[in-house]
Amino acid sequence: MNMTKITYAVLTAFVLLTVVPSCHKDDNRDVNPDVNPVQNYTSENEAEISKAKIASKVAPETIPWSESYNDFVVKVEKFSNKIATKIGCQQSGNTAVSPLSVFMAMSMAAECAGGETRQEILNTLGISYEELSTNIQELCKECNRILGLYDGEDESKAKNMIKCVNSLWIKDGAKVKDGGIKNLTTKYYSDIFKMDFLNADVNQLVTSYIKNETRGYLAPNLELDPATLIMLMNVVYLKEVWNDYGGNLDLTDKKYDFVNYDKSTTSTKLMTGEYVSGKAIVKEKYRKFYTSTNSGLSLTFYVPNEGYSVDDIYNTDVLDDETQYVYTDSENRYHTRCFFPEFTANYDNDIKEIIKNLGINHLFGSCDFSNLTDEEVFCGKIKHVAKLEVKREGIEGAAVTSVEMCTSAGPAREELKDVYEDFVVDKNFVYVLSRYDVPLFTGVVKKVE
């Protein structure tokens, strides 16, 4: 590595480690005065990103619940159910997918794309560009929250939080357009970084960014292609406790025999949730109910009935079912609590083929990315990494989705071997963790410890 690259790597690492964005999106910290605000550039040449730029952040304001946004969330939920089942249905172990992260990354791709490339992405997302452009800021705001933080407390002490951070990584020297940059920074609150993808340290720098945004919880090596010209990336992080005091959930007095996916049984105690209003929904193939967290997230369980397994119920017909909970009838008011197991689940794979099978083709071949750049690019990989833990002390999860836009130039890269990690968890069920109907994490738990 020559001296220029060494100096660049050191400076970039310093920026990543010291000027990373905070979960508190009204952050007005001072940044390096030499860092030029991208949205003030006036020509394509000046729009070359010369240094790392931290975008303005989302203000933690109350969001008006408009009919337009409500309709948008319904469509986000339908895409989320579709992509989660497509990703997770073939996995042999316990699976965690963040549909929100995939939706954000693909929405950024739609923002950068034009023509048939954009339309294919929008068709797959199930929304129009007008709907996306009108509502994406509200979704970003709703999914960037310090939850349950007392006045005067430092955000680092917050027991509950949700982050959804977007970023754009651009190869040194690549020509990008002011309009595309402005849309990503103003609509998606994207952080902007200049990056030498040929640099040996690039994966370490990207990992450092993800690690910082997830409080050290997730630190994957994305193994970026050296031919990458542009990378779009979303990072989701969730930290949540069960009650005001952050105390552990009680366990049941007795042990229950649970049937695993392989028909074996394990005797274990379950966590005891609080009573919430409503009566469990019972269908032919499954029964369904939810438990609530300290700040109001919903963790919904779909448990297969006798003679069925998660293979029979992990599909969009089940997840899209709009049957409402019964809270009262002529004689009763219902309250139900969940007894549920601790579990850990994860995912780490390239989802490019899954995205292609949903109907997006131009992104991977004759790609029009003209709203961000006129350079010839194509999508080489869409990497999704997710991890979720549901424990007695609370819930913690994180995910990253990266869309690598490559050129034909650059050194050849060997095909990577897919690695799958199975976590021994505790039940044969489907789960959806959501906030105001937006699915944050979805997956299947197949094995009890």
Image: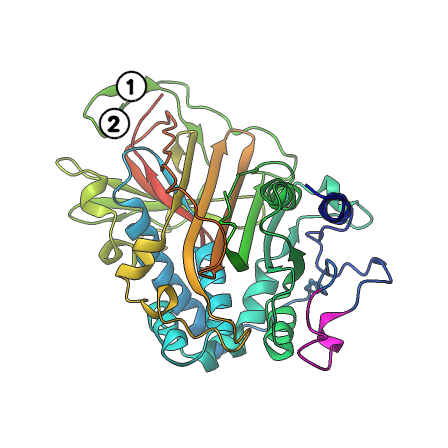
> What SS does tag 2 mark?
loop
Residue 330 visible (yes or no): no
Disc 1 and disc 2: Cα gap in Å? Answer: 8 Å
| Residue 245 percent across, percent down from the top left | 66, 35
Amino acid tagged 2: Asn
Query: Which quadrant of the figure contains the N terminus?
Result: top right
Q: Tag 2 or tag 1, which sits nearer the N-term?
A: 2
Q: Which mark is residue 388?
A: none
Determine the main secondary structure of the stretch shown in magenta: loop
Query: Which color scheme did the rendering employ for the protein?
Result: rainbow
Residue holding disc 2: 260
- Is residue 268 depicted above or below 228 in this figure? above
Apparent side of residue 313 relative to residue 419 in the rendered image (left or right): left
Amino acid tagged 1: Thr
Residue holding disc 1: 266
Apparent side of residue 420 relative to residue 214 in the rendered image (left or right): left
Labels 1 and 2 touching (C-beta < 8 A): yes
> What SS does tag 1 mark?
strand
Residue 442 visible (yes or no): yes
| Residue 40 percent across, percent down from the top left | 75, 77
Q: Nearer the viewer, residue 256 or 205?
A: 205
Q: Residue at x 58, y 38 (%)?
A: 241
* The magenta stretch spans residue 57: no
Q: Nearer the viewer, residue 413 or 433?
A: 413
Q: Magenta span covers which residues? A: 37-49
Apparent side of residue 297 relative to residue 181 in the rendered image (left or right): left
Apparent side of residue 291 relative to residue 5 in the rendered image (left or right): left
- Is residue 223 depicted above or below 372 in this figure? above
Q: Residue at x 55, y 73 (%)?
A: 372
| Residue 89 percent across, percent down from the top left | 26, 45
Q: Nearer the viewer, residue 244 or 108?
A: 108
